[in-house]
Amino acid sequence: MVRTIGIGVIGMGWMGQVHSRGYRLVPDRFHESGIASRLIVCADNVEARARRGKEQFGFDRHVTDWREAIDDPRVEAVAICAPNAMHVELACAAAEAGKHTFCEKPVGMNPQQTAKIARAARRAGVLSGVGYNYRWAPLVQYARQLITEGKLGRITHYRGRFLIGYASNPHGVLSWRFDRAQSGMGTLGDLMSHVIDMAHMMVGPIARVVSQQETFIRKRPLATPGEGTHFSVSKGGPMGDVTNEDYVGALSRFACGARGTLEACRVIQGSKCGMAFEIHGTGGALRWDFERMNELKLYLPQEDGTRDGYVLMQAGPEHPYFVHFNPGPAVSMSYEDLKLIEDYLFLKSIADGRQGQVGFTEALAVAEVQDAMQRSWASETWETVGPVDGES
């Protein structure tokens, strides 16, 4: 028997389209799971974009008022793909309505909003999901498996980074991501959230940080509402101020005793989508970079010295989730495949009736590190990671 879950998607920009496509493909790629979705309603305040979403993905209807998506009795789960400024209102309303809620990171404009959202979902007893999609690359999951099994020994060093040049062009438009009033955090929310979550998954909680930030491009051309993405470029028009950070870097101390560096930048030249990590332990090491997401460099030396160097591994059916996409090794998977895995796991948690990973609990753990980083920007010293107040 197939368990079909009614979906409402709010925000039909790039991420709304990616998730809509993913939900449609779940019963194809994960056919044996017995889980399917029905796209009930898509919402966007730009009517043309909402209408296109309905036509392109086969939603039953489209609306311009997000409340109609949440209120629809056929909608069991809501996917929030709207700008950060809307997250707290949307997620809390969805929880209050008893709807299971997926929210793209960073789950709010700031750590306090993330804490409020997590509390609302917990009180309502709804299940949650968050868009930390880089977790689901098959070789990332395999790397985690190696660490869990102790193959790398005791972890001593972690280097995590997300260096991406999507905003390196000064003519890149002033989308909502560059506006503190609409986005809150800049790179700290957009990119560093992925870096922190990956570090948590691989090594465990971060205990203390010392951090810095910078805005390198301080003015950008104004964007046209409802058009383009944050990759869009414009010349010759009016300019506006960038009001949040382009770059964040931090030294970190993990609760397990490991030391690490965390770095994220949206305006760097050269690196196109360098979401990457390097992990060193007393028994070995490994490296992974999303730009070559189907490869893993693994160092597990033998006592006789015959394997004293990194070995290049390629993803294959023996690694988690890979076989759902390709039958043979070294056939590349894609970014949208990771989002599809993410969508499947969210639907599976609903079908199983229990919280899966990754949800608002993990998002709150990321927010607590972000909060410590922001405090460090002001104090210019080490700050302890601790609970965030979401009551105010």
Image: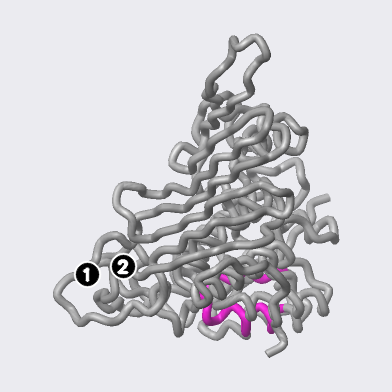
Q: Between residue 93 and residue 190, name the one nearer to us.
A: 190
Q: Is residue 341 magenta?
A: no
Q: Between residue 98 and residue 91, name the one nearer to us.
A: 91
Residue sitting at 50 percent across and 77 percent down?
378
In the rendered image, which quarter is residue 364 located in?
bottom right
Question: Label 2: how many residues lie within 10 Å, few (<14), some (14-19) or many (20+)?
Answer: some
User: Which residue bears the numbered disc 1?
Assistant: 234
- Farthest bottom residue in view: 392
Q: Mark 2 to mark 1: distance in Å?
A: 18 Å
In the picture, which quadrant includes the C terminus?
bottom right
Residue sitting at 65 percent across and 41 percent down?
156
- Marks counted in the figure total 2
Q: Position of residue 291 (x, y in %)?
A: 44, 41
Q: Between residue 220 and residue 341, name the one nearer to us.
A: 220
**Boundaries of the magenta span:** 77-94
Is 8 rendered above or below residue 120?
A: above
**What is the magenta segment's predominant secondary structure?**
helix
